[in-house]
Amino acid sequence: MYGKGLRPLSIATVAAILAAFSLVFFYTPLDADQGFIQKIFYLHVPLAITALVGFVGGGLFAIAHLRSGNSKWDAYSYVSIHISVIFGAAVLITGSIWAKASWGHWWVWDEPTLVSFLIVFLMYATYYPFRYAIEDRERQGRYASVFAIVAGAFVPLNFMAVRMAQSLVHPRVFATTNGGLPGSMMLTFLVCLLAVGLLWITLVKFELTAKSASGQVKRLRRALDAPAPGSRSRIAPEVG
Amino acid sequence: MLSLLAATPALPLDEAGKYVAGAYIVFLALLVVYVAIMAAKLQRIERELRELAGFAEQRNEQRAEVEAEHAEVGGG
Amino acid sequence: MTPSRVAFAAILGKDLRAELRTLQSLPAMALFAVTTFVIFRFGLDRTQLSGSLASGVLWATLLFAAILGINRLFVAEHEEGGFDAIRLAPIDRSALFAAKAAALLAYLLAVELVVVPVFAIFFLDSAAALPPLALVLLLADLGLAATGTLISSMAVNSRARDLLAPLVLLPLVVPLSIAATGALEPLLAVGGPGYHRFGTWLAVLGLYDLIFLLVGYAVFDFLLED
């Protein structure tokens, strides 16, 4: 039963998001140097952290899938990656807006974390055509799990390599680490991180529930010997 | 760490506000688009369930008719 | 259970012999690379390359030539039902991964043996950078062999297989490319080979190789299940 607990979870998510946005706009002081633009950060960074954790989670679910053979782990892996890709798109768009506001360009190659994230996003974007190209469902799940594991191993290597490629002459790095944040900003940041994290979990559960419902409809259809409808999803695992 | 931030200039508040608003609006827009897509899925599930319910009821009626015939033939 | 060494040697030998006999991939890869150099000569409007331009042109060309070979790596197995034979044979399936990766490495090195001197003749002032360059390429090819074999073995079982391998492989080798060109750029500098952060980049290449060889070895079993 995937839908169980979805209501309290979504209520908690809404509460967290309201609290987070309120803190961002009514409580935290303006940043001394960046000014109002810094507020984008409270959205951009939690989205990025959540997406990356989601990608790693997708890899962990994939390992569970390969070891157990239980296709529910494949569904968890697929949905984790799917929601993380959507969050990833949000990361890149908000990152681009911040870049335009800060430096006047819609994209900057000087910001290694953003560039690394672009590469990770491109990697996981190939997950869909990859799954779509493999016709046998069981094989599709296995190969997708291998992909998720390989891509998971790739993420830290990628961040390391891009950071190393930064020319040391160009210190136009925006310090995004938590180390420099004063107390009030830190609190807001953590609440935002919690809110975005809860949102991710809610959306994953939501998606799994919808898939499960579709799966139950198919099961009912088979049990009734009713004729099959026209369209079927060729990618994305079925949830029984 | 914060000294590095000094390299980036701050925009005046009204201009910066547009960018910040834009970022948060993009976030909300993506969320709403996701909800819309899920709504479409939900519609499809409802439609299929309705179709299957009709199919099951129809089949039950047919079975009831057949049994009624047998009862006539057998009992009468 | 046939020991892995024997299986490894057998599969590797079969592949290399087949390639030597039919010469399907190697000449095409080399020719592709040399022609691409000519395109770059005109595209960049340069007759001499150094530093970042040289390393970029060299690595990008070698990478795209490698993809030609990677696309063809498992085609023979797929068409002649070779996967079934390997599935049935009492061998450790990861031996197939090791053998195929070794074969791919051999192809890459063979192509580079021809292509790199041509690159030097076309664009470089001196051959002084070539020995350390060969070391960088060797480590980079190892990583390319590991990831290429892994992706190719999955792509061969799919539709649009020629499209899938490059699509998935290119983002995957970005860290490898960053490290390879990072090491190559100072080597190909105007004044003579420089070794700025050479050791660091080699270490990154080695780390990439290690990780993906291990990952490939670990998951390959799951790829051959029926």
Image: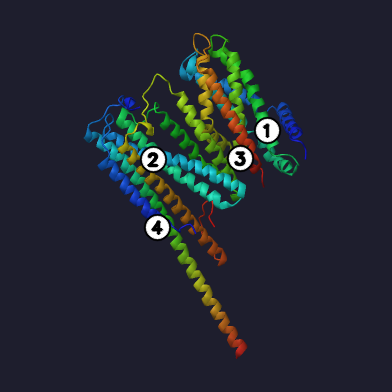
Q: Nearer the viewer, mark 4 or mark 3?
A: 4
Residue A24: x %, y % from top left? 29, 41
Question: How far apart in space, not on screen, are marks 4 and 3 (Cα)?
Answer: 40 Å
Q: Is residue A132 visible?
A: no
Residue type at mark 4: give it: Arg
Question: How far apart in space, not on screen, are marks 1 and 2 (Cα)?
Answer: 41 Å
> Which one is in front, A27 or C75?
A27
Q: Which mark is residue A46?
A: 2
Label 1 with label 2: CB-CB less than 8 Å: no
Label 2 with label 3: CB-CB less than 8 Å: no
Residue type at mark 1: give it: Ala
Neighbour tally class for label 4: few under 14, some 14-19, many 20 plus, Cα within 10 Å: few
Label 4 with label 2: CB-CB less than 8 Å: no
* Image quarter in which the N terminus of chain C is found: top right
Q: Which residue is mark 1?
A: C98
Q: Which residue is mark 4?
A: A7
Residue under the point 66% across and 36% down: C74
Q: Is residue C47 left or right of residue B26?
A: right
- Earlier in the chain: of badge 4 and badge 2, it is 4
Mark 1 falls within which chain?
C
